[in-house]
Image (cartoon, rainbow, N blue to C red):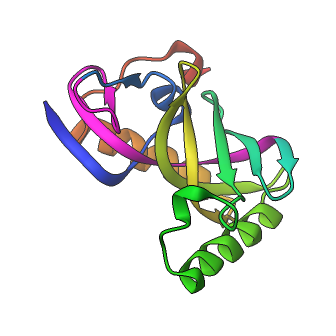
């Protein structure tokens, strides 16, 4: 099985939503059973937003082919997972997450990168990086790059009747 572990793979939403859990690699997902990956990048419009202060921000990104559920954790200062890291480093991570949370608003075009995780049987993107796109051509460019990379690097993309209409 090929692997792009720890590489942010550019995917369209319908391709992201088709990812499945890997039984042999607990921290990775499979694309069509042949490509192992753990990180992804997408670009689209924020269509929903649920904010729990000091806990998390859940939102969805829609690129026209589907909606990716995303979660941005905001509990770095109280998380036992990060308690072993240096306090200044954790504060920087927490500040970056708070800044990202203020950028994510319904209707904005955002490029989001992060770790692909499975929660309650569904794939989601655990966000590590947010960039608000102001270029009106960015989404089309993302589509073209995702399709090109899907064909040349990740294997052939499935035909999606909804994407062409």
Q: In this orientation, does residue 118 appear? A: yes
Is most of the magenta stretch helix, strand or loop? strand
Q: Nearer the viewer, residue 106 or 120?
A: 120
In the picture, the quarter occupied by the N terminus is top left
Q: Nearer the viewer, residue 34 or 24?
A: 24
What's the residue at 66%, 74% (across, down)? 96
In this rendering, position of residue 52 left or right of residue 160: right
Is 42 covered by the magenta stretch?
Answer: yes
In the picture, the quarter occupied by the C terminus is top right
Please provide percent x and percent y for residue 143: 50, 44
Please provide percent x and percent y for residue 149: 31, 45
What's the residue at 72%, 59% (across, down)? 74
* Residue 124 in the image: above or below residue 137: above
Please provide percent x and percent y for residue 18: 45, 21
* Residue 32 in the image: above or below residue 4: above
Residue positioned most to the bottom: 88
Q: In this orientation, does residue 106 appear? A: no
What's the residue at 67%, 64% (across, down)? 133
What's the residue at 60%, 73% (across, down)? 93
Residue positioned most to the top: 161
In this rendering, position of residue 140 left or right of residue 62: left
The residues colored magenta run 24-48
Q: Residue 71, located in which quarter of the rendered image?
A: top right
Q: Nearer the viewer, residue 152 or 51?
A: 51
Q: Residue 158, located in which quarter of the rendered image?
A: top left
């Amino acid at each position: 099985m090929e692997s792009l572990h720890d590489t942010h793979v550019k995917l369209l939403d319908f391709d992201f939503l088709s990812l499945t859990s890997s039984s042999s690699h607990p921290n990775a997902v499979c694309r069509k059973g042949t490509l192992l990956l753990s990180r992804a990048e997408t670009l689209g419009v924020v269509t929903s937003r649920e904010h729990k202060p000091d806990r998390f921000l859940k939102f969805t990104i829609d690129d026209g082919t589907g909606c990716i559920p995303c979660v941005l954790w905001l509990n770095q200062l109280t998380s036992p997972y990060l308690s072993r890291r240096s306090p200044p480093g954790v504060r920087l991570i927490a500040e970056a997450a708070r800044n990202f949370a203020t950028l994510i608003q319904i209707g904005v075009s955002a490029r989001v990168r992060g770790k692909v995780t499975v929660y309650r049987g569904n794939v989601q993107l655990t966000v590590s990086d947010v960039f608000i796109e102001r270029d009106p051509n960015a989404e089309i460019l993302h589509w073209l790059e995702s399709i090109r990379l899907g064909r040349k690097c990740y294997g052939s993309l499935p035909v999606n009747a909804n994407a062409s209409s």
